[in-house]
Structure formats: structure tokens, C-alpha cells
Image (tube, rainbow, N blue to C red):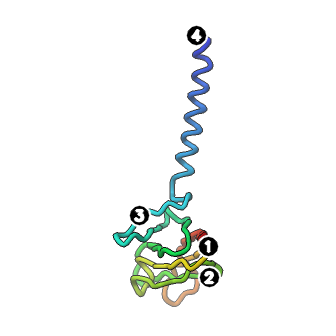
Amino acid sequence: MIPARRHIIPLLGAAALVGAGVLAAGCGGADGTPASTTKAGLAVYDAQHNVVNLTSGPKFVIVLPEPPAGARWQLVGQENVGGITLQGMQRANGGGQWTFATTGAGSGTLEFQQVVAGSDDPTDEQDYEVNIQ
């Protein structure tokens, strides 16, 4: 019985490491899982769920945190992302929800920068990988 225990303990340790790796890979929405879904069925993505994997047709929402007073979020380089169009944003300062429609196959990175009024230097950035099939 003792010799079998020598083999079981390393196997259990290896299984624990593999399980932890699978859990880590699935965390943070890196697999394209949205943070939530709206009542209308739109997929919602946030800073922890920043990979968008969708088929062409549905709309999706990116939620950005409310910027501090005097700052706003802006979308940078949307023209480098194929397969989507901006439908609108919820607040004039760029906080809240940004809604996009998927228009066809394409991919790229949506980059949002937070800037303070009167400055061109970003104080914060959030990137979203977009893959539309």
C-alpha cells in the first residue's frame, strides 16, 4: 500500500496544477465571455471581460467606469477594427455604455483613453480585443 501512495500524491499535485491553469485561463473574460447580458440580449463587456468574440449581426456593449470630474473617455482608432460600427454612447463624457453593432467579419483592438480637459495625454486606457466571425 505504501508504494502506491508515492505515485498517487504526485499525480494529485499535477492534477491540481492543471486545474488551476484551466481556472486561470478562463478568468477575466479572456475567452470572450461577456460580463453580463442586458434585458434586450446584448452582450456586455467590461475591463475584466475585454475580449469580444461574436458572429456578425448582434449589437454589444462596452461599459467604461465613470471618469473623474474634468475627464472623459474617448475612442481611439476605431477605423482599425473591422466588422463593427459605433451606435452611440450613454453619456457625453464617455462614461457608461458604448454600443456597437456587428456588421460583418473583422477583428482588431478597440482602444479607449481617458483624458483630462485641456490635455492630450491619457490618464487611463482600456483595450478590447474584437473578433467578429
Find residue 99 and report its horizontal and vertical position in percent: 46, 79
Q: Nearer the viewer, residue 92 or 3?
A: 3
Q: Amino acid at mark 4?
A: Ile
For residue 77, the mark is 2
Tell me the distance, in whole angstroms, between the alpha carbons under discs 1 and 4.
55 Å
Dot 3, crowdedness within 10 Å: few (<14), some or many (≥20)? some
Q: Residue at x 55, y 69 (%)?
A: 55
Q: Amino acid at mark 2?
A: Gly
Q: Earlier in the sequence, mark 2 or mark 3?
A: 3
Tell me the distance, in whole angstroms, between the alpha carbons under discs 1 and 3.
20 Å
Q: Residue at x 55, y 39 (%)?
A: 19
Classify residue 96 by image quadrant.
bottom left
For disc 3, the marked residue is 36
Q: Amino acid at mark 3?
A: Ser
Find residue 6 and report its horizontal and vertical position in percent: 61, 17
Q: Earlier in the sequence, mark 1 or mark 4?
A: 4
62 is higher (above) or lower (below) than 115: above
* The N terminus: image quadrant: top right
107 is higher (above) or lower (below) than 91: above
Q: Earlier in the sequence, mark 1 or mark 2?
A: 2
Q: Residue farthest to the left?
A: 39
Tell me the distance, in whole angstroms, between the alpha carbons under discs 4 and 3.
50 Å
Left or right side of 99 for 107: right
For residue 109, the mark is 1
Q: Looking at the image, do the residues carrying marks 1 and 2 touch, with CB atoms under 8 Å apart?
A: yes
Q: Secondary structure at mark 4?
A: helix
For residue 14, the mark is none
Tell me the distance, in whole angstroms, between the alpha carbons under discs 1 and 2.
8 Å
Q: Residue at x 57, y 51 (%)?
A: 25
Q: Earlier in the sequence, mark 2 or mark 4?
A: 4
Dot 1, crowdedness within 10 Å: few (<14), some or many (≥20)? many
